[in-house]
Amino acid sequence: QVQLVESGGGLVQAGGSLNLSCVASGRAFSNYYMGWFRQAPGKEREFVGSISWNGDSGNYADSLKGRFTISADSAKNAVYLQIHRLKPEDTAVYYCAARLKFMSTWSSWGQGTQVTVSS
């Protein structure tokens, strides 16, 4: 089991940038892919992107390519999500998640961090 703790959310103005962090702990989390999801009010949870701990296999939701960047620092057990040119529609709770590399189900989730973008 992997434990995940997100941080870095807050209130930002449209057009700005934000860096979210996710620190992982537990056993053998290097066997996991790390992902970011978000859930806006009244909407279903949406996949943002994912990455492996060595930085390979990064992929993003097609609708979000270009403004979102995911990176990983295995030395710090941390995964990051950078969001550029923020829009009000980026307002959501952002979640970090982990899944074993041979599984399709995201089995571990953080508590989420709120991002609110003002216009």
Image (tube, helix red, strand yellow):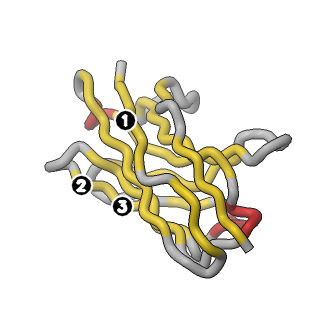
Q: Which residue is mark 1?
A: 32
Q: Out of 2 and 92, give the one closest to the viewer.
A: 92
Q: Which residue is mark 3?
A: 71
Q: Quadrant of residue 14?
A: bottom right
Q: Quadrant of the N terminus?
A: top left
| Mark 2–mark 3 distance (CA, rounded to whole Å) | 7 Å
Q: Residue at x 42, y 30 (%)?
A: 100
- The correct choice, above or below, for 70 with respect to 98 in the image is below
- The correct choice, above or below, for 31 with respect to 75 in the image is above
> From this viewpoint, which residue is outermost toward the right?
42
Please tell me whether mark 2 sits on a helix, a strand or a loop: strand
Mark 2 in CB contact with mark 3 (< 8 angstroms): yes
Give residue 119's mark.
none
The amino acid type of the residue labelled 1 equals: Tyr
Percent x, y for residue 83? 53, 68
The amino acid type of the residue labelled 3 equals: Ser
Q: How many marks?
A: 3
> From this viewpoint, which residue is outermost toward the top?
1
